[in-house]
Image (cartoon, rainbow, N blue to C red):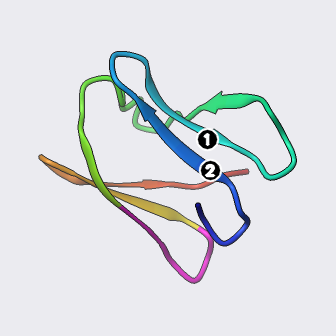
Amino acid sequence: MDSKRNTWIKIIGKGLYFVRTGSKKMELVQTDEGLDFRRVTPRSFAEDDFGNIWIGCTEDVYKVSLN
């Protein structure tokens, strides 16, 4: 859960999703780089002071910005 109380969910073989506060709809997380979260394994999540979500994976670190 992030500071806006969004819930983050990794579904094996499907990708990375989040559910906005007050919603029941899962939204697929997509990056500007076209990263396919079905192919990476998130190990940790952190949020910076600007609301960006940083996802540490086995191979790299990725930044996700929600609009």
**Residue 16 against residue 53 in the figure, above or below:** above
Given the current orientation, which residue lies at the most extreme left position?
Answer: 59
- Would residue 10 appear left or right of 38 to someone viewing this image? right
Q: Quadrant of the N terminus?
A: bottom right
Q: Amino acid at mark 2?
A: Thr
Whether pointer 1 and pointer 2 mark residues with C-beta atoms closer than 8 Å, the reply is: yes
36 displayed left or right of 52? left
Q: Which residue shows up at 73% across the image and 51% down it?
A: 67
Dot 2 alpha-carbon crowd within 10 angstroms: few under 14, some 14 to 19, many 20 or more: some
In the rendered structure, find residue 7 and report the number of the disc placed on it: 2
Q: Position of residue 7 (x, y in %)?
A: 62, 50
Q: CA distance from mark 1 to mark 2?
A: 5 Å
Coordinates of residue 60 in the picture (x, y in percent)? 18, 52
Name the mark on residue 18.
1
Residue type marked 1: Phe
- Magenta run includes residue 57: no
**Residue 37 image-quadrant placement:** top left
**Residue visible at 66% across and 72% down in the picture:** 3
